[in-house]
Image: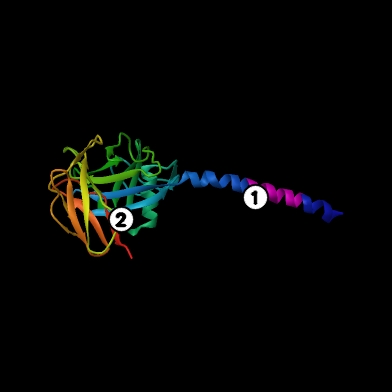
Amino acid sequence: MTNRITSPALGLLLGLAMLLGLLAQPAVAADKVPANLRVVTWKGQILFDGTVKSGTAKIKPNSDCLGGKPGPARSVSGPTALGLLYQASVQYKALRPLKLSDGDFGFAICGIGGVAAKNKEWWVLRKNYTDSMTGAELTKVKRGDSILLYLAKSYEDTTPDTLALNAPGKVRKGAKVKVRVFKYDGKGKRSVVEGAKVSGARGALTNAQGYTTLTINANTRLVARQGSLIPSNRVQVTIKK
């Protein structure tokens, strides 16, 4: 008798548990979204450029800087630019150590990947090429967003425009590929760039329409640069088999 009564009850409980688990999974998955993160310095060094999944993160401040201090960990509801940076640092050594402080205005970014803001330097945050009006903790991130953290030389100077490179991801060996370079100002206004150099393959500087032609002979990583402007996104080009 016991077995006949217990088995259906147990089955019902297990079924409910599985149902609740299945219903909960989409909410967890939906909390994490993929977005691109780029970390660049005013010296032209690209510390990181990649896509990372981000969501709510429990972050512990570990530094005394920018008016903030170390302290207990607290949860940052995400996805946010800060959560994206933190979760990327957990996965990628290039972003460690990540130095953060916490104060009256929330989390502050002190240093990324061993590069710390000194003197008048500061970390500029741009979302989809536009200056963010909030700090990294409050800057919400959606699927496919582009987040740039740029170590500017001085908070007294205007932040340079950001370059953007359009190039194909796959080509045949020896192909001549036409690429284009744009730039965005802090308000997100786009314009073409003349005289930019695309490193990683042979080719002339971009023309008045922002175009240049490259010869691709092997798998390569392309980056556009021009003077003091912020280097472009990296484009990984692979040779078709």
Q: Which amino acid, by three-letter code, is at mark 2?
A: Gly
Q: Position of residue 12 (x, y in %)?
A: 73, 48
Q: Magenta span covers which residues?
A: 9-19
The residue singled out by tag 2 in the image is: 169
Q: Is residue 10 magenta?
A: yes
Total labels: the figure holds 2
What is the quadrant of residue 107 in the picture?
A: top left
What is the quadrant of residue 160 in the picture?
A: top left
Left or right? Give the position of 165 relative to 37. Answer: left
Q: Position of residue 167 (x, y in %)?
A: 26, 52
Q: Is the N terminus in the top left, top right, bottom left or bottom right quadrant?
A: bottom right
Q: Is residue 228 magenta?
A: no
Q: Residue at x 15, y 46 (%)?
A: 228
What is the quadrant of residue 24 in the picture?
A: top right
Find numbered disc 1 in the image and state the secondary structure of the residue it sits on: helix
Q: Nearer the viewer, mark 2 or mark 1?
A: 2
Q: Main secondary structure of the magenta part?
A: helix
What's the mark number on residue 18? 1
Q: Position of residue 28 (x, y in %)?
A: 52, 46
Q: Disc 2 to disc 1, how far (Cα)?
A: 42 Å
